[in-house]
Amino acid sequence: MKYLHREDLFTWSEFNAERNIDFNSTLWVRKEGNILIDPLPLTPHDLNHLKELGGASWIIVTNSDHLRDAKNIRDITGAKLAGPQGEKDSLGFPFDRYLTGGDELVPGLKTVELQGSKTPGELCFVLDDTTLITGDLLRCHKPNCLMILPKQKIIDIENVKSSLSYLLEFQAINSIIVGDGWNILNNGYQHIKNLVEQLNN
């Protein structure tokens, strides 16, 4: 796994040839128990690295299209599963907790619910007020070019605009760790603001 912009954050990726981007997973290392977000399959190297870093206490799935290897990694690590309340009945197997906007699974990890995406109640997270971790709706197919899903996959663009506008309340966001594409490690808030303005024009 690779370091991100903080020594307690790691990522591993899988290249998607269809979209010419990386799919990404995130690990937050914390003494109270590590958290994985949208975990892809782990190579033997990455699995050993995860074990060295303390395994996992929680696995969070942001939406049903990002189940990825969550069930298998749960079985390997013994971690609990958390996912979107909006998809409680469509995730395919039971989770230990279902999250909605305003929840904090653990201190410092604020849940934001994004409405209008291709799945109901998609989740993203604001870590320590400064790092946004996204699932499907917010992505970055080119460096420093924050975008949303293609319009044909959006259920309700007005709800999307409203949800993204809510993110502007988190003015200290500097980094954006995306599930799909390139991470943005500086000036994250300005990128969100620019995207919201673009969608509203």
Image: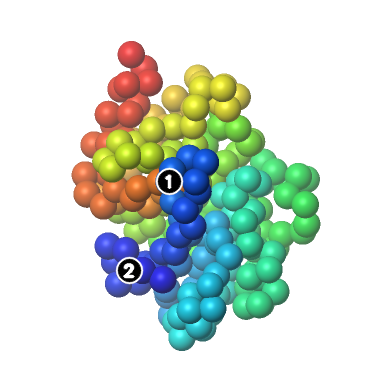
Q: Position of residue 99 (x, y in %)?
A: 60, 51
Most foreground residue, 61 or 179 = 179
* Residue 146 to residue 177: above or below: above
Mark carried by residue 3: 2
Q: Mark 1–mark 2 contact, CB under 8 Å?
A: no
* Residue 166, x across and y down, in percent: 41, 34
Q: Is residue 28 left or right of residue 42?
A: left
> Which secondary structure lies at badge 1?
strand
Q: Is residue 131 visible?
A: yes
Looking at the rendering, in which quadrant would you find the C terminus? top left
Q: Residue at x 27, y 62 (%)?
A: 5
User: Is residue 159 found left or right of 72 in the rendered image?
Assistant: left
Tell me: 197 left or right of 17: left
Percent x, y for residue 147? 38, 33
Which residue lies at the image location 58% right of the left edge and 27% below the top edge? 153
Q: Position of residue 100 (x, y in %)?
A: 59, 46
Q: Nearer the viewer, residue 145 or 186?
A: 145
Amino acid at the residue labelled 2: Tyr
Mark nearer the N terminus (1 vs 2): 2
Q: Which residue type does callout 1 highlight?
A: Ile
Quarter holding residue 141: top left
Q: Which numbered disc covers residue 21?
A: 1
Please rate how many residues cluster around mark 1, counting C-alpha atoms within 10 Å: few if below 14, some from 14 to 19, many from 20.
some
Res 60 quadrant in image: bottom right
For the point 69% across and 64% down, the residue is 71
* In this view, 131 is above or below 56: above
Say which residue appears at 53% left-offset and 72% top-offset: 43
- Cα gap from disc 1 to disc 2, whole angstroms: 19 Å
